[in-house]
Image (tube, rainbow, N blue to C red):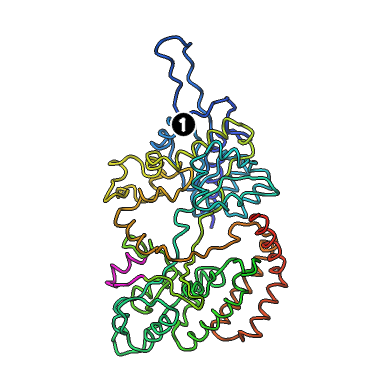
Amino acid sequence: MKGNVLKTLVLAMALILVLSACGGENSGTKNGNNGSTSPTTTPSSGGSETNKEPESPIEISWLNFYLPGKDTATQKYVEELFNVKITPLGYDRSNWQQQINIMLASGVRPDYIGNTDLTFADFLSYVKQGLIGELPVEKIREYAPNYSAMVDKYDPTAWNVAVVDGKNYGIPRIYGEGGSPFLPAYNKEWLKNIGYDAPPTTLEELEDVLTKFRNNDPDQNGKKDTYGMSVRGKDTLGSNQIFNTVFAAHGIRSSGWHVKEDNTVEHVLVSEQARAVYKLLNKWYKAGLIDPEFITDDANSYRAKFVNGKTGMMDQMMWYHYHTEGAVGADAVKTGLEFAVGAPVIGPAGQMNGIVQGYKQNPYAIGADAVKDEAKVKKILEMVDRIATDKDVYMKVSFGEEGVHYDVVNGGAVRKAEFSDIAKSVSTVGTTFFKAADNPDMLVYEYSAEKQAYKEELNKSEINILYDIMQLVDLPSWTENRDAIDKVLKEFQLKFVAGEVDLDAGFDSYVAELNKIGLAKATEEANAAYARNNK
């Protein structure tokens, strides 16, 4: 115990000493730099102009996750390319909240807040505390036009995320795989043994497959010891990514908000579609199709049961998990499992729906002190723009030098073994630390041709995408009552599936209880936000 305390104190002192180089209240300099990405200004060869002195680098403190090394190759590359001097501010992700709190308490104010573990609630809190500065959207579009076009292409609603009291305080952040749906996968040998040549395509076929996975000895060991499916009940119960295929077949996500036919917004888990989902799941649970241990299964046990032949279906994974380089694919290679990835099944509405995480994420931001310096704001936005949209710069910052830090294999970047550990690579070479923003268009350079083809094969264009209409929208009543609401959602989801609560009157009582503890007010706020953002 004493050792842990001492370690924390040493970490705190180290952070304060190292990070004080940022200058405390304002780590940058106001030097009027015009934002050119050239290291120097080149004089005219004809001598008709007076030689100009090289412009002083703009100083920028840059917050990202992981602990960066000092003056790494990537840092030197970025500094020379953009004529900046960067003070990297990083942290060990194992106890990031403590480290960032120490950083802020010591007076350090990052100029750029990039890829971090901070939540949307943290972002809103920092805005209210005056740690993040106002950043007009027009300025982002002017200084980062290519990045802005990328945001417009993938999710224009991302521009609404950082708006607080009518003012914008952040840079939209896009998740590269935000449009990839969760997909069901099935034990291929089991399918064959029960008479299926391909994965089920409808909800009725899915029920038939799961029934036979339970009752027809699909592994042919003479025992009734298999189940149709399980889910990650321990770490997703009541929230998201649970029973995805069944929820999607009924036209809703397994969490979040959706727009009803009357153009009003409601939480999906109080919808009539959710009631129908729970009735079907309760039927399956009573029939033994769902592993009763689903309540305590987490990501690891859930995956292990599938790859080791205890359950025949999983649906809380995306395409890259199933690839041989992904968690499921790699484990399946070890156990010798052959599996088939199917498309989301067609449900009562006759539509193939897929649940996605969504493109928009917690925004990037510029510090409250830094936004007062127009040259610094311009420079940061130009860096975000070019690092995210210029292939050569993106690859250099993300992977390092080709042939030294990574190789291109079949069209995709493959890190050399000694740089495969990202945290270690950040500390030695600096790769990924100065990655200013994500861009889905750049993923084609990261994936091999084979992997890209696999992605396109599984992410079928005919899949209708279901996303949370209120993702990263500030709903004060939801935030204020989140713990109480989550408790009820988890408690009743378990009871609904297990059949402990009636899904007629009992479901109505569940909705009434949620409304009483804050959902009704949150729904009002959600409808107001939807109307405001969709004028």
Please indicate whether residue 472 sits to the left or right of residue 177 in the image: right
Question: Relative to 135, is 29 above or below?
Answer: above
Question: Relative to 228, is 114 above or below?
Answer: above
Closer to us: 478 or 66: 478
33 falls in the magenta region: no
- Could you say where residue 218 lies in the image, as x and y percent from the top left? 32, 84
Question: Relative to 372, is 348 above or below?
Answer: below
Pointer 1: what residue? 82
Closer to us: 223 or 350: 350
- Could you say where residue 252 lies in the image, as x and y percent from the top left? 54, 71
Closer to us: 523 or 403: 523
Res 295 visible: yes
- The residue located at (50%, 61%) in the rendering is 357
- The residue located at (44%, 61%) in the rendering is 180
Is label 1 in a helix, a strand or a loop? helix
Q: Residue 169's image quarter?
A: top right
Region in magenta: 328-341
- What count of labels does the image hold? 1
Closer to us: 203 or 450: 203
Give, as a three-letter code, the residue at label 1. Answer: Phe
Please indicate whether residue 37 sits to the left or right of residue 5 in the image: left
On the rendered image, what quadrant is the C terminus found in? bottom right
Q: Rate crowding at label 1 as few (under 14), some (14 to 19) or many (20 or more) other CA atoms within 10 Å.
A: many
- Could you say where residue 3 lies in the image, as x and y percent from the top left? 51, 53
329 falls in the magenta region: yes
Res 232 visible: no
- Could you say where residue 513 lies in the image, as x and y percent from the top left? 70, 76
